[in-house]
Amino acid sequence: MKTRNFRRERGRGYPNSQFSGRYLASANAIEVSFPIMSSRLDSLFLLVVILGSTILHAQNTPADALLVLSKSGQTLAIVDPSSLKAIVRIPVGNDPHEVIASTDGKTAYVSNYGFGAYNTLAVVDLVGQKALPSIDLGALRDPHGLDFVGGKVWFTAEAAKAIGSYDPATQKIDWILGTGQNRTHMIYVWPDLKRIVTTNVSSGTVSIIEKTVGGPGGPPPGTMGGGGGRGNPAPRRPSDWNETVVAVGNGAEGFDVSPDGKEIWVANAQDGTVSIIDVSSKTVTQTLAADAGGANRLKFTPDGKLVLISSLGQPDLTVIDSATRKTIKRIPVGHGAAGILVQPDGSRAFVACTPDSYVAVIDLHSLEVAGHIDAGENPDGLAWATRH
């Protein structure tokens, strides 16, 4: 009884002097009460730790968020760019390679690559921080490169030698075009939806696909089903797409379009070179001996002054001055790198150092490594999500 009273009175906040005078008369009571109290305190401490851990990880997605894929972990990490900490990791399925965010910053799409083994795009609710049902691409296997333009997800499908678009509003694939090239890998869609660029790794080419205005179509005038013969105008055909295949270098993979839209820079992994394509003439105007063997990704800074090239075969990030076409620095980042993302304000770049399982943070003013992010094992694809 004294033991129960001891605990109850102590819970009411009585001072210790009252405890010693009223309830600690027996040595046996002391021996029994303190182990029980200690056990309860230990349990309370454990509960606080668990609740604290839950609160720590239950952070809202920031308005500006860095998205990082972990290939081995099969997760998408949402990273707070201010703290450089991952606030949550969400499962995204097998072999995730590339990620893109919707224009409103509320949804992410991830390509499940697998060298022909998979045919899905994983979908993530960035606000609710949860996985949504994936998108089945059917025969369009081997999805890899992604872009989000005009309210649609644009993707490559290597095994099908094709590109396509998925409309989230209708939940349907609404357009497919074959490239006829081997390993159509990365994709960029112009904001006006009139031009698309892809790199074709094994073919060593770039496809420039341009939309043309539809013209008169249907059967000849005066024939059954045709217009014009009875004074009716001939129906107009839907818009066509014309593809120009430009030969670049072996292993053409990472590429970017200059901010002014006039040039396409392509990193050729096997040759270690960079091909520069003039968009208007659709021809290679210069090939740079960039010494970027194993080049994986290439990105412009928003002001167009610098070009960054990562390499899975070299320890450095190559920095090229776009005006002089000269390499101005090689920044040691680890044992190799894949994805590159430049922060929209141009202050930092994030480089996925896959072999080292971290993302290097590059200060683009000093051109030095400013930190590292732990976002999962073997990081690769990166994206930026700004919620509107």
Image: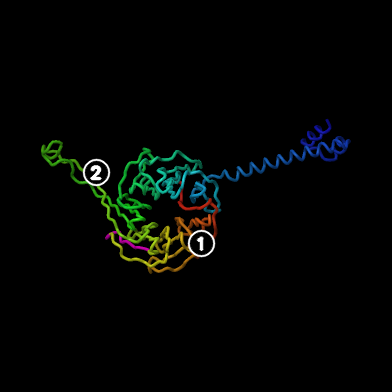
Residue 3, quarter of the rendered image = top right
Mark 1 vs mark 2, CA separation in Å? 49 Å
Q: Which residue was labeled with disc 2?
A: 238
149 in magenta: no
Please tell me whether the stretch drawn in magenta is mainly helix, strand or loop. strand
Residue 324, quarter of the rendered image = bottom left
Magenta residue span: 274-281
Mark 1 or mark 2: which comes first in sequence? 2
Which residue corresponds to the image point at 53% horizontal and 46% vertical from the top-left? 89
The answer to whether the residues at label 1 and label 2 have Cβ atoms under 8 Å apart is no
Amino acid carrying label 2: it is Pro
Seen from this angle, which residue lies furthest top?
A: 1
**Residue 368 screen position, x and y as percent:** 51, 64
Which residue corresponds to the image point at 36% horizontal and 43% vertical from the top-left? 166
**Residue 238 screen position, x and y as percent:** 24, 43
**Label 1: how many Cα within 10 Å (few below 14, some 14–19, many 20+):** many
**From the viewer's perspective, is residue 192 above or below residue 26?**
below
Q: Which residue was labeled with disc 1?
A: 333
The answer to whether residue 121 shows anywhere in this view is yes
Image position of 65 (left or right of 264): right
Amino acid carrying label 1: it is Val
Image position of 263 (left or right of 18): left
Front-lying residue, 179 or 41: 179
**Label 2: how many Cα within 10 Å (few below 14, some 14–19, many 20+):** few
Helix, strand or loop at mark 1: loop
**Residue 258 screen position, x and y as percent:** 36, 59
**Residue 300 screen position, x and y as percent:** 41, 60
